[in-house]
Image: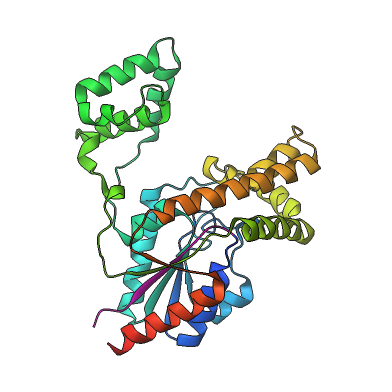
């Protein structure tokens, strides 16, 4: 019998991590795969709501602290880590409980998305070309000539997407559009998916309360330490909601009170983006709150284990 796989998704501060931990403890023989891009970084602990040392002593957690904060993280690299973790869990005959709010990383694992490779040198060359007068228009014309379908799906002024499409074409010699529309397909891969329904009022309050708690626990000190470490913070790590705004304060651009307000506002916007992403997926069964999520996970795992 194939080992069961269950996913719990939801917006940040929805309580999904606590719900998953409780369910895994209750069921037993469950390993948690944290599908959150930022918990992969060592040292980014408070501002990512990473499981505590005590929680990680109670249960096996995967994809946490697998990178230094100076390293870049791509979806393709994360998919490799996740696939490797899932294979190990299956080999041990345990259930895998996927938990996270990073929608693209979640889909990369659940749906085994075909993700094109990256090449920094090629991308930098294209970015430099786009920055020259008329450069972006010329790149878009090149894309249209090489892959008309991909060009039709991309706004001509969207530099990031134009560059990415041409990067993939130059690396692989394949049309960017040949990598498919996997994000628009919702196939059944045998993963039971449960989601905590978004409550804007509760989320806004929880996000503000949590951020002030992190500050009290030493979030600024944590960020100071990350900046002082060899290599500092990578581009992807610097973009984390909350960290990015505090960095602007530490670098002298923003007063602390303003940075805190901006961090909370950015995290609230993130929560809404996460909700919009996940609610499109018809495979997710929605529940109200962490307690219902815990009960739903326990029921699914019990049924799958006895089936």
Residue at far bottom of view: 306
State which quadrant residue 133 falls in: top left
Residue 116, quarter of picture: top left
Quarter of the image for the C terminus: give it. Answer: bottom left
**Number of numbered labels in the structure image:** 0
User: Which quarter of the figure is the N terminus placed in?
Assistant: bottom left
Horizontally, residue 110 falls left or right of residue 234, namely left
Q: Position of residue 259 (x, y in %)?
A: 74, 41
Instruction: Please determine whether, in this image, residue 295 is positioned above or below residue 16.
Output: below
> In the rendered view, would you say 136 is above or below 190?
above
Say whether residue 52 is magenta. Answer: no
Residue 197 position, x and y percent, is 50, 63
Residue under the point 39% across and 49% down: 75
Q: Nearer the viewer, residue 293 or 122?
A: 293
Indicate the position of residue 126 as horizontal and vertical percent values: 37, 24
Q: Residue 50's spot in the image, x, y percent?
A: 59, 64
Q: Is residue 147 visible?
A: no
Q: Residue 211 or 283: which is nearer the viewer?
A: 283
- Scheme of image coloration: rainbow
- Work out whether 240 lies above or below 189: above
Q: Residue at x 54, y 80 (%)?
A: 22
Relative placement, left or right, of 65 versus 278 is right
Q: Which residues are magenta?
A: 1-12
Near-viewer residue (225 or 293): 293
- In this rendered view, identify the residue nearer to me: 275 or 72: 275
- The structure residue drawn at horizontal position 42% and vertical position 55%, both measured from the top left corner, is 279
Q: Residue 136's quadrant in the figure?
A: top left
């Amino acid at each position: 019998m194939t080992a069961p796989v269950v996913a719990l998704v939801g917006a940040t501060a929805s309580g999904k991590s606590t719900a998953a931990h409780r369910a895994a403890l209750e069921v037993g023989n469950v390993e948690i795969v944290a599908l959150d891009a930022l918990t992969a970084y060592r040292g980014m602990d408070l501002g990512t709501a990473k499981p505590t040392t005590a929680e990680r002593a109670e249960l096996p957690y995967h994809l946490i602290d697998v990178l230094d904060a100076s390293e870049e993280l791509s979806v393709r690299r994360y998919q490799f880590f996740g696939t490797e973790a899932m294979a190990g869990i299956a080999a041990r005959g345990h259930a895998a409980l996927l938990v996270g709010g990073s929608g693209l990383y979640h889909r990369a694992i659940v749906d085994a998305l075909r993700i094109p490779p990256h090449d920094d040198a090629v991308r930098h060359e294209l970015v430099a070309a786009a920055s020259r007068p008329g450069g972006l228009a010329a790149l878009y014309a090149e894309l249209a000539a090489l892959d008309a379908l991909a060009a039709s799906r991309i706004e001509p002024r969207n530099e990031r997407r134009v560059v990415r499409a041409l990067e993939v074409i130059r690396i692989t010699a394949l049309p960017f559009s040949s990598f498919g529309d996997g994000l628009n397909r919702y196939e059944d891969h045998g993963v039971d998916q449960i989601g905590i329904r978004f409550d804007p009022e509760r989320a806004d309050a929880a996000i503000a309360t949590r951020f002030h708690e992190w500050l009290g626990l030493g979030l600024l000190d944590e960020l100071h330490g990350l900046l002082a470490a060899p290599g500092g913070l990578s581009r992807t790590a610097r973009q984390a909601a909350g960290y990015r705004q505090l960095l602007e304060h530490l670098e002298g651009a923003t007063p602390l009170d303003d940075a805190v307000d901006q961090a909370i506002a950015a995290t609230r916007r993130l929560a809404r983006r996460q909700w919009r992403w996940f609610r499109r997926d018809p495979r997710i069964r929605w529940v109200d709150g962490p307690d219902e999520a815990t009960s739903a996970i326990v029921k699914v795992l019990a049924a799958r284990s006895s089936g």
